[in-house]
Image (tube, rainbow, N blue to C red):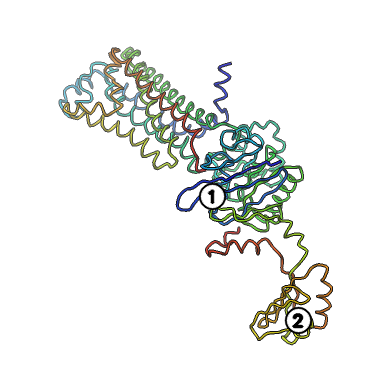
């Protein structure tokens, strides 16, 4: 019975349309991530490791410093930049397409003129958004494991890599929830993009700047990326709390969107 | 029974925009026209009825249910055509209609296909909505509004973008629905459309409902106005029923046999209001004169409406399309 109640919150035709409308971008971003992870597995060999450790100081040295294994290399490079920025762009674009763009352009009127409830529409969009990110990271995980097996059999710590993927997914779960919430609350793409995208990019930039110097360590309190701690995830210790916090923030923001949308005035 | 009840609806967007203290009741089976210049508040009123906006003051009810909390209950038997139709750019018409039909819970799709044939777009539904012209989009919007055979239709400028043939087809469709007992609330600024389809008209301006009139008052008026142009001024003087003739250029109101007879010497015309029962008297009076033309001035809604439109200049009927 409960499953039936939940099913009523989802509109299948809309759910299907969400996949069709956003499939191109989802494939593009996932493909880019897969290419990067494959190249990483290919590039990282004991000899490159030596040469990287030889290069002292500088941004690259700070980023890849202290690398002893394939998963650390992936954690410090792929999960520091590509895995952050590409899905972030996906979230910013898709969040806007899902809600605010429909309100601004007026296509939401067509959906709302049917007996489909507002809460159903916002829940369906949120569910699609979250599931698309799950799918993205599932594919990246599988491709990463396969690529490592092809290029360097047994060199990858699969458990640590899985923790990284889950952690990164939860990080993007929060980023997507921020963008989605902005997209639900505001009625113009400009404001929604500025706020949702702005906050997300701010987190990324602060994290990048922080790495330039140890003196900038206090900046960790100003970025969400602190909760996506690759070192802790790889070592497998002290990461659970971070992931729970990420899960909580994301859930709260998605629920906020679902509560707000049925109650707001829509300038359609 | 009232299907639509709007009482004291107010929504202030600031800057004198919005709607102010609007009350409208629409009876079952009635076709109600909502006339007004652009930006008068027609669409805003409709959006309240659709539950897109909460009422700031007053309330809106449809089928005796409040439009905000019960919007989905109401929309099960309601068809809505938005004023500014927007469709997703990444779908074909067919996909979009299918999606909306599913969301409306329509199982029998025969009627939808019938409508597609009626509006002659059954062959064009594979075209992407992005590439469709305004008129085609309008037809798709109309099909979507009608395809669940609604009991109440809210149509916001329904014929904008349609060619004259399609406009007529649309008006016929409205007539069919009316004959089957549907209630229709449509906004428009096309007088011909309103006169042809509506039973009653509300005139809205600057967010205020200024007048409600029955269309039948125009259609079945007992008195008509005729404009008669004469070959020369002397011809007018031949009419014995008109006693005083003024100087050239003067417009004189003469009341003898014909009420409200206006003589315009410069243009050599008279305009005269005649009851249908007195029409023979007019013909008799004119029989001695040399007349250039004789025409009936329609007691049209447009003339009536212009009185309200015109009072502050810039909002004439230039938007008629």
Disc 1 sits on a residue from what chain?
B
Quadrant position of residue B286: bottom right
| As drawn, A163 above or below B216 | above
Of residues B157 and B102, the one nearer the viewer is B157
Whole-Å distance between the Cαs marked 1 and 2?
48 Å
Q: Earlier in the sequence, mark 1 or mark 2?
A: 1
Residue B198 at least partly seen: no
Which residue bears the numbered disc 2? Answer: B242
Rendered location of residue A228, percent (x, y): 31, 22
Assign a secondary structure to mark 2: loop
Left or right: where B179 falls relative to B49: right
Q: Residues within 10 Å of mark 1 (few under 14, many from 20)?
A: many
Quadrant position of residue B218: bottom right
Q: Quadrant of the C terminus of chain B?
A: bottom right
Rendered location of residue A42, percent (x, y): 31, 22
Rendered location of residue A192, percent (x, y): 40, 38
Of residues B2 and B45, the one nearer the viewer is B2
Q: Residues within 10 Å of mark 2 (few under 14, many from 20)?
A: some
Do marks 1 and 2 both belong to one polypeptide chain? yes
Q: Quadrant of the N terminus of chain B?
A: top right
| As drawn, B260 above or below B63 | below
Numbered circle sitting on residue B160 = none
Of residues B13 and B153, the one nearer the viewer is B13
Residue B240 at least partly seen: yes
Which residue bears the numbered disc 1? Answer: B20
Left or right: where A127 falls relative to B247: left
Left or right: where A242 falls relative to A215: right
Rendered location of residue A24, percent (x, y): 46, 33
């Amino acid at each position: 019975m409960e499953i039936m109640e939940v099913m009523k919150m989802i509109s299948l035709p809309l759910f299907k349309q969400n996949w069709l409308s956003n499939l191109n971008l989802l494939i593009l971003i996932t493909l880019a991530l897969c290419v990067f992870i494959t190249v990483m597995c290919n590039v990282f060999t004991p000899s490159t490791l030596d040469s990287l450790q030889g290069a002292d100081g500088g941004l690259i040295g700070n980023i890849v410093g202290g690398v002893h294994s394939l998963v650390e290399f992936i954690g410090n490079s792929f999960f520091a930049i590509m895995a952050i920025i590409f899905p972030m762009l996906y979230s910013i674009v898709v969040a806007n397409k899902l809600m605010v763009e429909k309100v601004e352009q007026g296509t939401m009127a067509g959906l709302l003129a049917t007996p489909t409830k507002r809460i159903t529409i916002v829940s369906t969009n949120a569910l699609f958004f979250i599931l698309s990110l799950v799918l993205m990271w599932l594919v990246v995980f599988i491709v990463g494991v396969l690529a490592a097996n092809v290029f360097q059999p047994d060199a990858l710590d699969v458990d640590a890599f899985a923790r990284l993927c889950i952690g990164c997914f939860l990080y993007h779960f929060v980023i997507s929830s921020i963008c989605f919430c902005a997209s639900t609350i505001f009625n113009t793409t400009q404001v929604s993009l500025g706020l949702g995208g702005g906050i997300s990019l701010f987190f990324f930039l602060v994290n990048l700047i922080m790495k330039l110097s140890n003196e900038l360590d206090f900046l960790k309190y100003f970025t969400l990326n602190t909760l996506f701690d690759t070192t802790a995830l790889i070592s497998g210790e002290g990461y659970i709390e971070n992931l729970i916090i990420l899960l909580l923030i994301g859930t709260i923001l998605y629920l906020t969107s679902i509560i707000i949308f049925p109650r707001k005035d829509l300038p359609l | 029974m009232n299907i639509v009840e709007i009482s004291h609806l107010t929504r202030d967007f600031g800057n004198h925009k919005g709607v102010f203290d609007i009350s409208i009741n629409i009876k079952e089976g009635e076709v109600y026209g909502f006339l007004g210049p652009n930006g008068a508040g027609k669409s805003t009123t409709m959006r309240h009825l659709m539950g897109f906006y909460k009422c700031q003051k007053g309330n809106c009810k449809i089928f005796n249910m409040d439009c905000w909390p019960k919007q989905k209950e109401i929309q099960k038997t309601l068809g809505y055509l938005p004023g500014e139709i927007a469709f997703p750019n990444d779908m074909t018409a067919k996909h979009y209609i299918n999606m909306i039909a599913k969301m409306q819970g329509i199982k029998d799709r025969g009627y939808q296909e019938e409508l597609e044939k009626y509006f002659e777009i059954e062959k064009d539904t594979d075209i992407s909505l992005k590439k469709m012209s305004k008129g085609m989009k309008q037809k798709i919007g109309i099909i979507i509004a009608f395809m669940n055979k609604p009991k109440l239709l809210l149509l916001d400028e329904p014929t904008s973008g349609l060619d004259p043939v399609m406009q007529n087809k649309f008006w016929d469709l409205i007539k069919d629905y009316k004959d089957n007992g549907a209630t229709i609330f449509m906004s428009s600024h096309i007088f011909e459309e309103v006169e042809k389809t509506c039973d009653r008209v509300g005139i809205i301006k600057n967010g205020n409902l200024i007048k409600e009139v029955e269309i039948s008052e125009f259609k079945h008026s007992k008195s008509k106005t005729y404009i008669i142009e004469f070959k020369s001024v002397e011809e007018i003087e031949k009419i014995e029923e008109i006693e005083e003739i003024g100087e050239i250029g003067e417009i004189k109101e003469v009341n003898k046999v014909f009420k409200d007879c206006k003589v315009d010497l410069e243009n050599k015309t008279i305009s005269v209001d005649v009851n249908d029962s007195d029409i023979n008297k007019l013909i008799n009076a004119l029989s001695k004169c040399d007349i250039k033309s004789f025409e009936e001035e329609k007691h049209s809604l447009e003339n009536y409406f212009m009185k309200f439109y015109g009072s502050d200049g810039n909002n004439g009927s230039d938007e008629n399309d």
